[in-house]
Image (cartoon, rainbow, N blue to C red):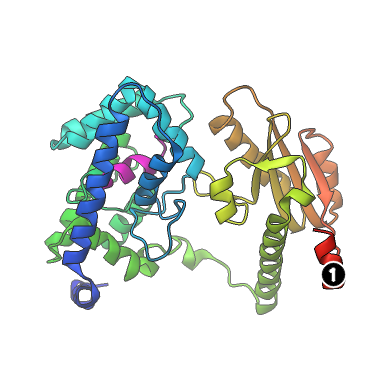
Amino acid sequence: MDNSELLKLWEDFKEKYNFEEKIQIWQNKSEQFKKFWNDKILPDGGDLVDEEIDLIIKILDSNGKGNTKSDESVARAMIAQGAWRRMFREIHVSSDLKQTLNNIFLSVDENKTQSEIDNLYKLNLGRKNFLTGENGNAINDMMFAYSPSRYVSIVSFNHRMKVIGYFGLQNSPLDSDSPGKRMVQSNKAIIDGFRSLGMESFPRAISDFLYTSLKNLWNKKQNDEEEVEESEEEISEEKIEQLNEEYYQKLIHRNFKKIFPDLSYVDDDYQNIHEGHYITTEGKIMDFLCKDKAGDFVVVELKVGGSDKSLGQICRYMGWVKENLCENNEKVKGLIVSEQRDIQLGYAIKVVPDVSFKRMWLDVKVVSWNDTESNK
């Protein structure tokens, strides 16, 4: 795409975008976040209640409890509601974490900001609180909420690099740099790059433009040209299987306690909104993440046609739970639920004792409404 085409899209975007309203919205939300940070997080002592944390999560995460499609939030952060709550509580009681984050928020010097972010990663090493990660979602999210005039709301480093690569905004690669340099320089490359093309605007507008008008361009798979075109029959079968799994997901979620009376969701608020799904910090979606009565984690994966590939998938999820969520030596178990029996999967599971394989059986009854009411 040449610059003239890009500028034409920008002019079309500007005609529909209410700049003054957006600036005011994010000034207000930033003040809310700062007040929470200064009044609730920074002072020692005192307890954080879920309701006050949830109000801030609504600002930070479009998937936050109570948000709708029309609500303004920083981004889709790929962090569950319960994980956000645990993160803020751990920051609140940790003087080194909250002081370092405060230094990051207040810093106006690029080198100092980079250094403080790198320090935060070192301080948080080994802690399972979702604050630090390869893509930096949580930190970038909070940096924008604190200073929306200085940072883009593209919180994922992966997305930033796709934007930078597609539009040629950075001469040198950032992938091998420290977390601090990656975050600061990728933010600078996007803001300066688009402003140099004549799109002089506040960072939220640039971010919205990239997601609403251009995402289908920069977010394409890098190996599109290498993918082998599938036949219509193959695509149709795959689509049907996907739709079946989505249907079973909703059906089991609605009847979860009847089907799994000994299990409960790890994050009720988040998973009830998302049909039982639990999203990892890497953006991978588990069908159900639960705990049993002994307090151990159980990863449940639904498959229409289970195969031995399912075992590798569920083991990856179990490993992620072990690494990120287990704090008191809990066990992590796996359950593959499939409509069809796969002999190869059955063989593979025999040597993985923490994973079990059960059949999904759809039982439909037609009864009178009176019978239904009496059996509630």
The residue under the point 19% across, 71% down is 3
The residue under the point 40% across, 62% down is 219
- Per the image, label 1 sits on a secondary structure element best described as helix
State whether residue 314 appears in this view: yes
- What is the crowding at mark 1: few (fewer than 14 residues within 10 Å), some, or many (at least 20)? few
- Residue located beneath label 1 in the image: 370
Query: Compared to 44, does 233 lie above or below?
Result: below
Quarter of the picture containing the C terminus is bottom right
Q: Position of residue 274 (x, y in %)?
A: 57, 56
Q: Nearer the viewer, residue 92 or 193?
A: 92
Quarter location, residue 169: bottom left
State whether residue 278 appears in this view: no
Q: Position of residue 261 (x, y in %)?
A: 77, 44
Q: Is residue 321 left or right of residue 9?
A: right
Which residues are drawn in magenta? 131-145
Provide the major secondary structure of the magenta segment.
helix
Q: Nearer the viewer, residue 280 or 54?
A: 54
